[in-house]
Image (cartoon, grey):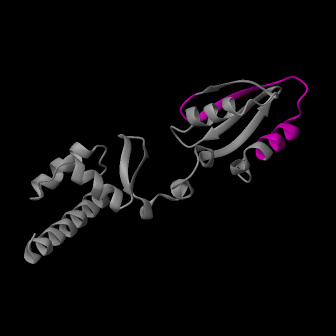
Amino acid sequence: MRKYEYIYIMISRDNRQQAIREVLGNSKISSQEELRSILKSRGFTTTQATLSRDLSALKIIKIPDDEKGYIYTMSSELPPAYTHLEDSSPLHSCRSIAFSHNLAIIKCLPSYAPSVALILDRIKMGEIIGTIAGDDTVLIIMAEGVSHEQFRELLVTRLPELRGRI
């Protein structure tokens, strides 16, 4: 590859990545195909593999969105409710816990409850009879005789990521 070809490739990549930043800053994009189409309309023809590399290099992530399911966003521009989730466990999505008799409800950010329930099931705590997950809520059926505070403390001990969250 000649020096001028390398410089052209670098300029093209930088321009394309700048266009990606602009598109994501101004639109809710939910798929790579949708993003590729917009980039093409702006004069940037790219393959899916190249676009994937660009998204990775720019640290683009997907977050839940009420309108489109999931949308791409710059990890540096996460909405405040999501800033703690980058490179972390689904347990970081937990927002609160509430109790009623031998039932506990953990509220999570949208779409995280199934992952949280799976983690709870896999740690095999004798105090948990079972879990049921919705989109943002985990129902935990606790064994009889376990106090609410005792259960909360056991969860935080077994899963330290929950400390300060529930």
Range shown magenta: 134-156
User: Magenta includes 147?
Assistant: yes
The image quadrant of residue 154 is top right
The x and y percentages for residue 126 are 81, 27
The image quadrant of residue 18 is bottom left
The structure residue drawn at horizontal position 11% and vertical position 54%, both measured from the top left corner, is 45
Tell me: residue 47, above or below residue 119: below
Q: Foreground: 5 or 58?
A: 5
The x and y percentages for residue 166 are 73, 46
**Quarter of the image containing the N terminus?**
bottom left
Q: Is residue 78 left or right of residue 121?
A: left
The structure residue drawn at horizontal position 39% and vertical position 42%, both measured from the top left corner, is 70
The structure residue drawn at horizontal position 72% and vertical position 40%, both measured from the top left corner, is 97
Tell me: residue 160, above or below residue 58: above
Tell me: residue 46, above or below residue 2: above
Q: Is residue 161 left or right of residue 110?
A: right
The x and y percentages for residue 47 are 17, 49
User: Magenta includes 37?
Assistant: no
